[in-house]
Image (spheres, rainbow, N blue to C red):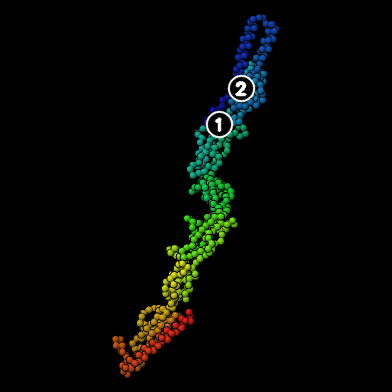
Amino acid sequence: MRAKQPQATCPTRAPQGRLQRNRDAVAWLFSRLWRASDPTLFQMTIIAALWVTVFGKCGPPPDIPGALLVSETNKTEFESYEFLKYSCRPGYIRATSGQTIYCEAKGTWTVTISCVSVKCRPPPDISHGRHSGGDEDFYTYGSSITYRCYPNFSLIGSASITCTVVNKTVGVWSPSPPTCERINCPQPYVLHGVIDSGFRATYKYKDSVRFACLKGTILRGKNTISCEADGNWHPSPPVCELNGCINIPDIPHASWLQNLPPKKEDVYPVGATLQYRCHPGYEPATRERMTLVCQKDLTWSPFKGCKDCNVPPNIAHGRYTKSIDYLRGFQPKATYECDKGYRLVGEADIYCRSSQWTPAAPQCKALCQKPEIRNGMLSANKDQYVESENATIQCYPGFALLGSQNITCLENGTWYPEMPKCEQEKDCEHVFAGKKLMRCLSNPNDVKMALEVYKLSREIELLELQITKAKQTVLEG
């Protein structure tokens, strides 16, 4: 509010109320006595006494704006020329040099003190904010104004300041004006705890959050923290100390019976239980109850889990890899593959069902590489042959076969009998492609006899090969 300019102050006489009326009555009485008889010594004495009593005293001291009576007194009447001392109230200063009032002989108070209110200059402006003051030239003692910040800025300090006095004469604003700053605190986090109230995407100055600990933990510290001017949380976020079990163990080939699968970071109080069941194709390893219990030492009770199928069967010249087939209801699976030089015969994947592996494990059959015949060819054009498979060799025209025409792939990846050769014919006449006759022998009967002898020898070789293979099978079994 705009204060009024002080005016010059002169000594004043204070009205006396009831005392003034008494003076008027006494004056009328004196005039009547004086006219009623000649003055006598007695009358004069009475008149003098009354004059001193009535006209020589002042009533109670007056109230002076902004001033406070300093002299201690309980009197209601004061003698002529008696002085009383005043001082200015807090927030006021003297506008005159005097600081007293005195009682005049005629019974009136003369005031020599005048107090005016202390004044403050207009409050300062602040960046990113404004105050509630107007366009006043000055503000009187006790005036207050309030600051506010623009959006996205936080007010640091006291929002309100007041016009006060320093050294009893100078008007100043107190406390110092606040500032408007962009203050943000990081997202608070407490392990095993949650924000119970006050959650926001971003936090500014004086925002507060309250934490609560998860089941199975105890809160240590203050549950409520505030974002302060330094961009940090004060006091520091609390700690949720464990009072239960965490890190639920993984149980192979089993699943939990709870509606919601438990998480490793979940905390369970002492005495809490979790039940599990075995996947299809598995069975409990013991007859004990399939339950985990959180013990007093904050560890989970021991468990036996689920019994797997027997170890998948091994195969010669091959190996397997175990896994879980989730599409088949968590069934254990063994996948086979053969060593280099062997081919898988049978199903590559077998599964555990009712503690049995089905279907039967596959076999790895040896592979024989395609025979290289110089000046000859194979009846079937194949790059590889499996165990017990035959290959038939034919020589080009003009070349004669030296050795067995049919060879067999053995289990060790070799050919039996040894690889034949195609050698150029000597002393024979050749009938080239389309004729397929040769005249090395003297007559056709000799040719027929030679072919029958060769056929018989091949049958004997094949029989010997089968006998040898049967013996090897017995020895390996």
Residue 247: numbered disc: none
Which residue is the site of mark 1?
140
Pair 2/1: label in front: 2
Q: Quadrant of residue 14?
A: top right
Work out which residue is located at the far left of the displayed protein and give it: 434
Considering depth in this image, is 121 or 132 the residue closer to the camera? Answer: 132
- Secondary structure at badge 2 equals loop
| Residue at horizontal 65 percent and vertical 17 percent from the top | 57
Q: Classify 10 Å Cα crowding around label 2: few (below 14), some (14-19), many (20 and above).
A: some
Q: Amino acid at mark 2?
A: Pro
Q: Is residue 118 visible?
A: yes
Which percent across, then down, holds residue 208?
Answer: 53, 45
**Farthest right residue?**
41
Q: Which residue does the numbered mark 2 point to in the structure image?
A: 62
Q: Residues within 10 Å of mark 1 (few under 14, many from 20)?
A: many
Q: Real-space Cα distance between discs 2 and 1? A: 24 Å
